Image (cartoon, rainbow, N blue to C red):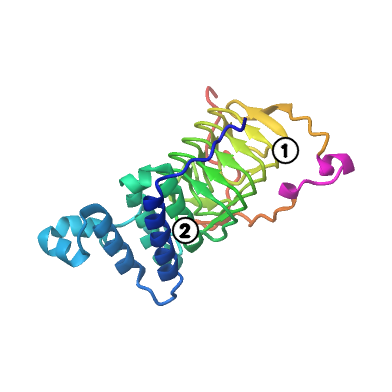
Amino acid sequence: MPWLLPREIAPLHQKALDRYLGSLTERLSDPNVDRNALVREELARLLYGRPYEELLEANPLAAMGLDPEGITFEAEYYAATDLEKFRRVKPLLWFWKVLDLTPLGQSVHSGVAIRRALAPFIFKRVGKNPKFFQNVEFSVGYNLELGDDVVVHRYVFLDDIGGIKIGDRTSLSDYVNVYSHTHHVLASPDVTLKETIIGSGVRITYHATVLAGVRIGDDAMVGTGAIVTKDIPPHAIALGIPARPVRYKVRHDCPYCRKGEPHPSDLVPKLPDRKGNPDYPDFLPPGFGTREAGS
């Protein structure tokens, strides 16, 4: 018996959801649509059951909280954020975030379906059938690339400011953190953007952290609570702090292993490291300006 079983909702509700998703996708596909207006209107109707203009007159602060032009994200304060790209995705990131607090967002069936509809209009690349559960966070959204059948569980944080690529059939468990930027230990504004690559068929389990710039190979697994600071090879099971391979999956059917060829994850091109703040142009060597403890 498979672990996941199919579930359906009442036909009346499914029909309403399908109609809504079709309308939402059609409107978002219009290059001339005002995404801020669309989002504030949809949220006003979902949360308050009334048009946005009525809510604005009755409760201006509540209305402000629904309008993407009335709120800010942390990424808007970053020197590295491309504000033009972020302007396009910001309304949909806000829709995603607020939707998670509604009954529609908390339901797996409707929540996953609506996020799946939003994903192609936010992320840099999206494969087929992405599955996002509630309360997933992104830094900018527009630097995230997903393969097919990627699953991202609750409370995952994807810091894509420097770029994150995730391969096919990869699963990120609850409370996983994936980063793509670092701060220098002596000067916090000295930020380096490092693209992070996660291969296909990877499992990153509960509460694990993937630091910026690493590459996790195809079919690898990262154990609970591990912190990945260096590259993990394909098929490895990595545990600990810092995460190190302790076993390797035996995959007799792996064509790359049989032929001694690189796995696809090894060949994914990675952007060079770059500075997120132009005030700090130089790359300082690791440990610069520090000394060993006890010395």
C-alpha separation, residue under disc 1 versus residue under disc 2: 33 Å
Q: Of residues 16 and 275, which is closer to you in this image?
A: 16
Q: Is residue 257 within the magenta segment?
A: yes
**Residue 249 in picture, x, y percent from top left:** 74, 30
Magenta segment, prevailing SS (helix, strand or loop): helix
Measured along the vertical axis of the image, is residue 115 above or below residue 232?
below
* Residue with the most extreme bottom position: 32
**Residue 184, labelled with which disc?**
none
Specify the quadrant that holds the N terminus.
top right
**Residue 233, labelled with which disc?**
1
For marks 1 and 2, the one nearer the N-term is 2
Residue at the location (46% across, 64% down)?
A: 82
**Residue 54 in picture, x, y percent from top left:** 15, 64
Determine the secondary structure under disc 1.
loop
**Residue 160 in picture, x, y percent from top left:** 51, 52
Q: Residues within 10 Å of mark 1 (few under 14, many from 20)?
A: many
Measured along the vertical axis of the image, is residue 47 above or below residue 186?
below
Instruction: Please give left or right for residue 177 compared with residue 41 in the image.
Output: right
User: Please, what is the three-letter code of the amino acid marked with disc 2?
Assistant: Ala
Res 170 → quadrant: top right
* Residue with the most extreme top position: 294
Residue at the location (32% across, 45% down)?
A: 103
Instruction: Please give left or right for residue 129 compared with residue 117 in the image.
Output: right
* Residue with the most extreme right position: 259
**Residue 117, labelled with which disc?**
2
* Residue with the most extreme front position: 11
Give, as a single range, the part of the protein colored magenta.
Answer: 254-266
Q: Is residue 142 within the magenta segment?
A: no
Q: How many marks?
A: 2
Measured along the vertical axis of the image, is residue 216 above or below residue 291?
below
Residue at the location (54% across, 48% down)?
A: 180
Determine the secondary structure under disc 2.
helix
